[in-house]
């Protein structure tokens, strides 16, 4: 009986060791992906969902999320994992595994949405997240470029899922860019970007140049202060 108990403990220890090894490999893969990607390319996704060891890949990702030491790091990790799901979807589509590619795209959208929800919770807690917005803007722009390329070559059966993923990514990017413009107008900073296919800028010559800009939802009025649109609130303390 003692022997059986020892074997059980040894088996559990071996399982945890194996899981830790895969988690470490996942961390290394993420680090490599971070250095290999550029504005329009994704790193190789590594194991795909139909690999029997894929469960260890997702376990390693769960460990990374558990070890993320604050909410900002968790948001960034959700976006990084969204990129891994997108890379998997791209590879699966290239291999004509359309059904699995669609599932990977759904997990991609879920990660983006979770990052957005967490960012909103931070903002409601009055925590500054402009750095997160800047980073999300750059990253989702890369996702959109990849999705557009994949969509252009995709068979008809795969286009609906890709179009949904593309629309979701574009919506998330527009939200982020809107927030960045709101922050710029609140603080009298310069910003030029494209929101919903329309170029907007906080540069101004007269206050009329500021009329169509998004702004923080409080009572106030536009000012053109030294060539910069600024939203001046009417609230008094």
Image (cartoon, helix red, strand yellow):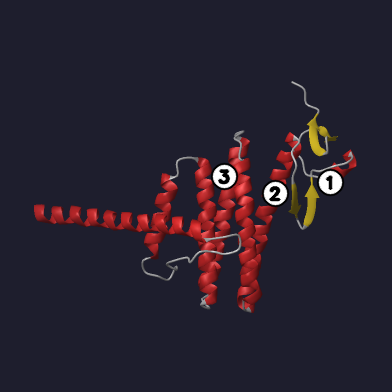
Q: Which secondary structure lies at badge 3?
A: helix
* 1 vs 3, front mark: 1
In the image, taking residue 128 as reference, residue 54 lies left or right, namely: left
Can residue 136 be seen here? yes
Label 1, label 3: how many angstroms apart (C-alpha)? Answer: 28 Å
Q: Which mark is residue 177?
A: 2
Q: Residue at x 53, y 49 (%)?
A: 76
Q: Quadrant of residue 93?
A: bottom right
Q: Which mark is residue 118?
A: 3
Q: Which secondary structure lies at badge 2?
A: helix
- The picture places residue 136, in percent across and down from the top left corner, at 61, 50
For this rendering, which residue is in front, 235 or 228? Answer: 228
CB atoms at circles 1 and 2 under 8 Å apart? no
Q: Which secondary structure lies at badge 1?
A: loop
The quarter of the picture where the C terminus appears is top right
Residue reaching furthest to the top: 237
The quarter of the picture where the N terminus appears is bottom left
Label 1, label 2: how many angstroms apart (C-alpha)? Answer: 14 Å
Label 3, label 2: how many angstroms apart (C-alpha)? Answer: 17 Å
In the image, taking residue 80 as reference, residue 176 lies left or right, namely: right
- The picture places residue 192, in percent across and down from the top left corner, at 76, 48
CB atoms at circles 3 and 2 under 8 Å apart? no
- Sequence order check: which comes first, mark 1 or mark 3? 3
Q: Residue at x 74, y 51 (%)?
A: 193
* 3 vs 2, front mark: 2
**Number of other residues with Cα within 10 Å of mark 3, as a class: few under 14, some 14 to 19, many 20 or more:** some
Q: Which mark is residue 212?
A: 1
- Sequence order check: which comes first, mark 3 or mark 2? 3
235 to 48, vertically: above or below: above
Can residue 217 be seen here? no
- The picture places residue 16, in percent across and down from the top left corner, at 28, 54
């Amino acid at each position: 009986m003692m022997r059986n108990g020892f074997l059980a403990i040894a088996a559990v220890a071996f399982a945890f060791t194996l899981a830790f090894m895969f988690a470490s490999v996942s961390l290394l893969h993420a680090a490599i992906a971070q250095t290999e990607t550029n504005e329009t390319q994704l790193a190789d996704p590594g194991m795909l969902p139909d690999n029997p060891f894929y469960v260890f890949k997702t376990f390693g990702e769960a460990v990374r999320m558990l070890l993320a030491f604050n909410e900002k790091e968790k948001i960034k990790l959700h976006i990084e994992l969204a990129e891994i799901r997108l890379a998997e979807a791209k590879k699966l589509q290239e291999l004509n595994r359309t059904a699995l590619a669609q599932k990977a795209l759904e997990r991609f959208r879920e990660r983006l949405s979770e990052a957005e929800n967490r960012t909103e919770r931070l903002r409601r807690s009055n925590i500054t997240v402009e750095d997160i917005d800047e980073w999300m803007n750059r990253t989702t722009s890369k996702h959109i470029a990849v999705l557009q390329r994949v969509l252009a070559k995709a068979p008809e059966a795969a286009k609906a899922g890709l179009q949904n993923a593309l629309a979701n990514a574009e919506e998330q990017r527009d939200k982020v860019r809107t927030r960045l413009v709101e922050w710029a107008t609140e603080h009298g900073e310069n910003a030029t970007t494209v929101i919903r296919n329309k170029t907007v800028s906080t540069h101004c010559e007269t206050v009329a140049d500021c009329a169509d800009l998004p702004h923080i939802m409080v009572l106030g009025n536009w000012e053109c202060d030294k060539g910069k649109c600024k939203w001046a609130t009417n609230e008094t303390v």
